[in-house]
Amino acid sequence: MKPTNNILRHSASLANKVFIQRDYSEGTTCKFQTKFPIELESRIERTLFEDTVKTLNNFYAEAEKIGGQSYLEGCLACTTAYLIFLCIETRYEKVLKKIANYIQEQNEKIYAPRGLVITDPIERGMRVIEISIYEDRGSCGSSSGSSSVSGSTAR
Amino acid sequence: MRNCEYQQIDPRTLTVTPSTAQNQTEKKSQPVRRKWEVFPGKNRFFCDGRIMLARQSGVLPLTLGLIVVTCGLFFAFDCPFLVHHLTVFIPVIAAVLFVFVTISLLWTSFTDPGILPRATPDEAADIEKQIDTSGSSTYRPPPRTKEILINQQVVKLKYCFTCKMFRPPRTSHCSLCDNCVERFDHHCPWVGNCVGKRNYRFFYSFIISLSFLTSFIFGCVITHITLRSQAGKSLVQSIQESPASVVELVICFFSIWSILGLSGFHTYLVASNLTTNEDIKGSWSGKRGAEDSGNPYSYNNIITNCCATLCGPMPPSLIDRRGFVPPDEAVPAASASEIELPLFTAKNDAHRCTQSTKDVLERMVHSSDIPGLCPHGAPKTTPLGLEVPSLPAPSMEPSPSALCSQQHAHQPAPLPCTQFSRSREKDSVQSINPAFRLALPSPSLSRTSLILGDTPDIGFVLRP
């Protein structure tokens, strides 16, 4: 248990993980709770967090929307004995890619400078949004840690 | 500082201590494995994870065999006569139906039905914490349930002791496959797989097209024998000339009853947006009182229900069979094997499943100031459910394993599937928080409350 291992591997140590659970009030469609967790109160502004979750919810709603396009996709798939699923990318998969890009962008711009990292819900079985909270282990506090981050990103 | 640029960090350029060098060589020698190889459920995988089946798929070959044999006999013995006397479209229609039936069957059998991956140790610990702190657990906690409101109706979510999570609504744990399956309908031994959210449309197509196929073949064979008899021969003579037709008749006769019945039943389920599981348990039948009646998932419109179930968007598979297991994780015995432990393995990962989050961590790590180290020390004791009161014996839910009413004398094509909807809850929790135990294979259990990485010396310090 040498400290040096930790320096090299994890100079920012994982302090905690927060799990944003699913909101089932409207059924089984994928939607996450926008309730602001207590653990994040000192780390990020409430509005930023809520914006992120709401945007994710909108993405999932778009993916699972039952409307003209999904009917077309379904009927076309049925007539081709569903072999079309082997060939084309479904709308859901396209939206999932958009979500992955969005989460990456949010992480880079908003969350990482605050010592937080969002894990894509698809990696957790769409059950939770996992937000990892990091403590900067340097002698400086977390605020100076983030300022050094922002300083370096400015270059 | 170039580290803030989004570049892959080469571990060799880092300052290497003997221990990290050792770890690197150890990691290089570890074989890279795909997630399906460490999947905890009772499934079998083929084609490097592309195809999956339940472990007990013994009846699927029988199903396929019956379909192929019946259609083969039809094409060989009945079609020549019928083409000559009636029309060439008969074998064409039969061929189209046969292809559709077979492909639907294969889709149903080989598709992930909507398996939910098991909870990561962190998630499980978080849930345990919530259960403990919410005060809902007494000295002898009842079966863990959580009540939520769905469309203004109270629905109880049950805790799955195997998967270590509260099951989403309409999800059930299949004991045969040992997985939680979303929108669980039933486990069908005839197709050798569970029928759930992702493959219900394939299953429905299969039974509907099979109904058409068996009816069509039955009708054609009757026509064939009738036409032969009309040409001045007796019935017995006609049958002797074409004995295969009798075999087909018998198979189709018995299968029509069951398949048509099953199709009708599932059409009713689709129109009311119900699953077999819910229908059998009577979840929304209103027996419990006027307040509870009404399916909260139904759109109250038959067409919308049908379209939503059959033509809705195809959800993705959540279990990522072909992804790679990060190679440097300590894999505890039970459930954590398929879990992708995030972010700690950023630097040493050869195969990154979460490229983006790990890149972010990389940048954070290298851009933060690291003069010295706070001693890895004070393991703050946290109320994370370290001491869970010993739980009692598992609370067994009454397990309705429903057999469809129709009996099958001859096994034609897939019949009323014996529908196993047992949600048997195994209490795998011993006296210690299981997530804690699973996540901490090393003896340094006492040091940390949340273990998220591969080495036991990782912990966290909660600042007051």
Image (spheres, coloured by chain):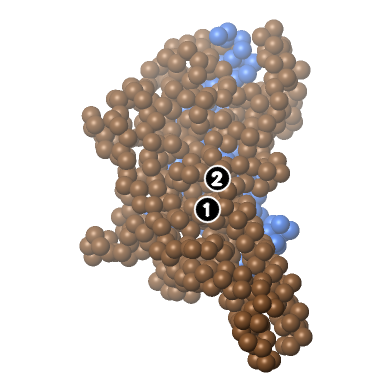
Task: Give the residue drawn at x 64%, y 58%.
Answer: B64
- Of the chain colours in the picture, the one used for chain B is brown
- The quarter of the picture where residue B103 lies is bottom right
Name the residue at 48% across, 30% down. Answer: B121
Q: Is residue B437 left or right of residue B45?
A: left
Q: Nearer the viewer, residue B380 or B95?
A: B95
User: Alpha carbon of mark 1 to alpha carbon of mark 2: how far?
Assistant: 8 Å
Indicate the position of residue B280 as horizontal and vertical percent values: 36, 59
**What residue type is disc 1 on?**
Pro
The residue marked by circle 1 belongs to what chain?
A: B
Q: Quadrant of residue A79?
A: bottom right
Counting residues from the start of the chain, the first of labels 1 and 2 encountered is 2
Tell me if I can see residue B391 in this picture: yes
* Residue receiving disc 1: B189
**Is B431 drawn above or below residue B62 in the view shown?**
above
Q: Where residue B138 is drawn, which disc sits there?
A: none
Q: Which residue is pictured at 67% across the width and 64% down the height?
A: B69
Give the colour of chain A. Answer: blue
Query: Label 2 amino acid?
Result: Gln
The C terminus of chain B appears in which quarter of the rendering?
top left
Frontmost residue, B207 versus B5: B207
Q: Please give the chain letter of the residue carrying mark 2.
A: B
Identify residue for label 2: B56
**Which of the 4 image quarters holds residue A104?**
top right
Q: Give coordinates of residue B346: x percent, y percent.
A: 65, 27
